[in-house]
Amino acid sequence: MTFTAVVVFILIFSLLVLVHEAGHYFAAKRAGVKVEEFGLGLPPRIWGKKRRGTIWSLNWIPFGGFVRLKGEDGEDARDKDSMAHKRPGSKLLIAVAGVLMNFLLAYVLLVIGFWFGMAPLALDIRELGEGEYQSQVLVLDVIKGSPAETAGIKAGDTILSVGDTLVTQVSQLKEVLSKETSAVVTVEREGEKLPITVTTQKEDGQRVIGVLVDEVMAKVHYAWWKVPYYALLDFVLLVKQIAGALITFVVHLFATASIQESVSGPVGIAKVTSEAVKLGWLYTLQLVAFLSVNLGLINIIPFPALDGGRSVFILIEMARGGKKVSKKVENAIHSLGFILLMILIFAVTYRDIVHLFSPA
């Protein structure tokens, strides 16, 4: 993992948190609630400056952020600028505003990316029968002991050609290799084109080199005026897919008291960021949009300490005709939820670190 990738990861994570907390901030200001502090990162505080009644702070723990509102814990209920004084509807909007901002950011990034030819994250543009696209053959995995491994082909390489034949589809790759006992396979790795001589081997009547490949869209040409619509379709499908994955994760967690291997924490995401940076800025843009939707959906989960958990208490208040749940009880539940979340984050991070330094 390069220094550049680490810096990009920190910038990406900071952007997502900043946008999320800005949603809470602007919703609170619009509702007339005093914002006492806007913090990037979690305490203890490194630096802070008070301006227009709000402390703008930078904190030591870089994963997260917060907006501290007057009356969010039930105090100063008689003051008009206190959140405790506001109607449940206003409080609910403040609670979910961060999630809405993350969704808006993801959609805007998809629109920008599509204008520059970025491939969709969830939408299969080929099924729509519209738009022109360029495909590439991506190496997903290399079989141990295979000719490809011996020759030096690696997972993540993009196969550009075999000999003088350009390769853009998996079927083309198979057809060209079937005629060769030895071939020069040109791959792209970290922006560099590498010619690699590979000896094929016969397997089930076909000549292969021992790679698992997939055909991916490298660049898509959309009608410019359809970009917002395609971005919306991609966004909706992405939300559905990530929501389904989160539900599966939660069910698996409570059913087995274990974390799925596919789940990553900050360290795992940093590693993915490193790969995206190597592939180019459009892939990095894809990742930011994906993470923004993830952050929004995670926060809306009805779990204590998250925006979704706080929203549940506001909805209970609305259902009871304005009668609030005891703040002592609510704060205790949120504190417990926060502790459990920290344990989960540390557990996932520890596993990511172990995987990072384990031999491949």
Image (spheres, helix red, strand yellow):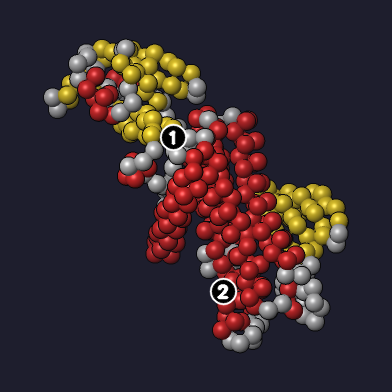
Q: Is residue 79 left or right of residue 122?
A: right
What residue is disc 1 on? Answer: 221
Amino acid type shown at disc 2:
Val
Left or right of 155, for residue 329:
right
Between residue 282 and residue 59, name the one nearer to us. 282
Q: Going by the picture, which residue comes out furthest to the left?
A: 205
Q: Residue at point 83% right, 52% down?
A: 48
Place of residue 338 in the rendered image (x, y in percent of width and height, measured from the top left): 61, 64
| Left or right side of 52 for 3 | left
Q: Can residue 254 be seen from the camera position used here?
A: yes
Q: Amino acid at mark 1?
A: His
What distance separates the C-alpha of mark 2 from that of mark 1?
43 Å
Q: Secondary structure at mark 2?
A: helix
Indicate the quadrant where residue 317 lies: bottom right
For the N terminus, which image quadrant? top right
> Residue 312 got which mark?
2
In the rendered structure, are the residues bearing label 2 and label 1 in contact, judged by CB atoms less than 8 Å apart?
Answer: no
Q: Residue at x 32, y 12 (%)?
A: 164
Eyeballing the image, is 219 above or below 193? below
